[in-house]
Image (spheres, rainbow, N blue to C red):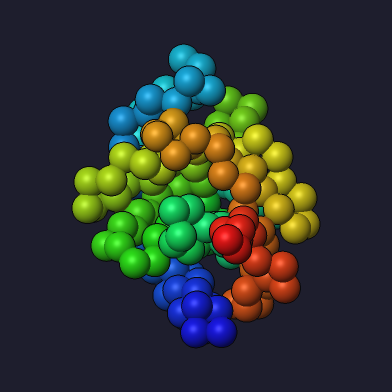
Amino acid sequence: MRTAAVAAGLVGALAALTACSGGGGGKNTSPHTSKAAATPASSSGAKAVTGASAKLQGSWITTSGGKIVALVITKKKAGLFVTGSKSWCAGAAGDEAGMQMIHLTCPGGSKDRITGMIDSVDANSMKVTWSGKTGQETYTKAEGGTLPTTPPHLPKKK
């Protein structure tokens, strides 16, 4: 239950962070992008995305290595936070060259989740393939700042 409270608080904090972040987008190394996607950065520093679809909007949760990963997308802005670490990232999400993409900058220097391509998204889950060592992750939608009723990818009990 304590983890649920921490994660819910993180979702709220990330929502506030992405509401005032300036965008990001580091070097685009995604194998899923084309030359057309390599457009110059906007004045805010974000990649040239045109806005995330309504399906992408909101708070998304997954687990990785026993840590909660919270991804929040609001309009064109995106923020990501990993519990138990100093890893947080901010940037942009939306349509790019006919694909749904996420571009993040992580001040701590993490390269695990810099560029992500949305493979699929529906009302309850979203699959993102990250260009870094993380690879593909499946996120569960967190409604209204609360955790999903079915936690994503819980470790198996031994």
Front residue of this view, candidates 131 and 46: 131
Residue 123, how many percent across, how many down?
A: 77, 57
Relative height, residue 92 to residue 11 (above, below): above
Q: Is residue 92 visible?
A: yes
Left-right relation of 54 to 82: right
Relative height, residue 74 to residue 145 (above, below): above
Q: Quadrant of the C terminus?
A: bottom right
Question: What residue lies at 45% left-to-right and 74% top-to-bottom?
Answer: 10
Considering every residue shown, the one lying at the far right of the view is: 123
Residue 127, how many percent across, how many down?
A: 64, 43
Question: What residue lies at 49% left-to-right and 35% top-to-bottom?
Answer: 135
Q: Quadrant of the N terminus?
A: bottom right
Residue 66, how many percent across, how many down?
A: 46, 60
Question: What residue lies at 49% left-to-right and 42% top-to-bottom?
Answer: 102
Left-right relation of 124 to 151: right
Considering every residue shown, the one lying at the far front of the view is: 158
Left-right relation of 18 to 44: right
Front residue of this view, candidates 41 and 69: 69
The number of discs equals: 0
Q: Is residue 43 visible?
A: no
Considering every residue shown, the one lying at the far left of the view is: 108
Residue 114, how many percent across, how many down?
A: 38, 40
